[in-house]
Amino acid sequence: MKIAGNLSSVGTADLAVYLIHPPTGNILINAHYPQDLPLRCKIIRQLGFNSTDTKILLISHAHGDHDAAVGLIKKETGARLMVMAPDVAQVESTATGRPGAKVDRVLDDGDTVELGGSTLTARLTPGHTPGCTTWTMRVSDGGRTLDAVIIGSPKVNAGFIPVSNKKYPQIAEDYVRCFDVLHPLPANVFLGAHGGYFGLKEKFAAMKPGGPNPFINPAGSTTYVGTKEAAFRQKWERQTLNPGSPTP
């Protein structure tokens, strides 16, 4: 579905994939699993575009439900894969379940990605993964210029260990940085790596020809980020008082 301007959703109700389609080709954010590619290509064709026109491939973070198919997409399209620096090793890893895809451009916080007049800014919002990335862009829609934010993930997974985490020692500090970045971001259009973050199914059902765009929801990001930060801090405090015990 078209979300706003040249920004469209081409994923599922839960696993979000975004297509930005300026005149000179496509930018694709997220890749899902290899078995999902035929459906993804079909959806893109239904919107009037070709998946083979993908020039730039981005991810929200280096977990399989968002990056497993990046290598296949690169092979099929020749797209340049761009990944935030702390997640590059995981994307290039050939371990089981990892894509083993060569990253063409390593990104740092604040870097921009441009194609055909569309510009995205990569914001490092770590914690969920060390290189978790939130994408921001401005889209023109109905004579208005809107700030769109695609949140990487501030979610705290089950088994979260914020204290004495040997695999990710600075995880708690990274989550704090994540929320510090997310709070001030202007977001007329609030999106995320999973549809559940922003009510994708409900917004899709609410779309009516000629009606208001349900994806324009300036308060949505503030509410969601505040809720996730409260959950993080509760788990962090709980484990600080009981070190060595993963939070549920």
Image (spheres, grey):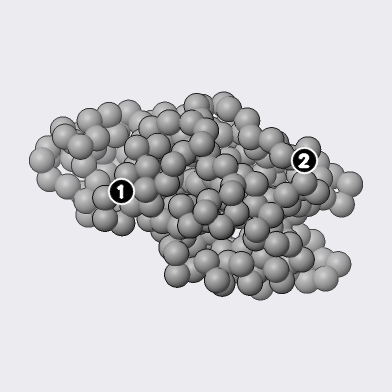
128 is higher (above) or lower (below) than 14 = above
Q: Which residue in the protein does label 2 denote? A: 116
The amino acid pointed to by label 1 is: Thr
Based on the displayed image, in which of its 4 quarters is residue 147 positioned? top right
Cα distance, mark 2 to mark 1? 33 Å
Q: Position of residue 11 (x, y in %)?
A: 56, 64
Question: Is residue 112 in view?
Answer: yes
Give x and y (percent) for residue 136.
62, 39
Residue plotted at (50% across, 46% down) = 59
**Do residues under tags 2 and 1 come within 8 Å of each other at their CB atoms?**
no
Disc 2 or disc 1, which is closer to the eye?
A: 1
Residue closest to the eye, 74 or 108: 74
- Res 50 label: none
Task: Say which residue label 1 marks.
Answer: 94
> Which image quarter is the N terminus in?
bottom right
Residue 176 left/right relative to 117: left
Q: Which residue occupies the extreme right position in the image?
A: 143
The secondary element bearing badge 1 is classed as: loop
Q: Residue at x 65, y 47 (%)?
A: 55
Image quadrant containing the C terminus: bottom left
With respect to residue 78, does 206 lie above or below? below
Identity of the residue drawn at 58% across and 27% down: 111
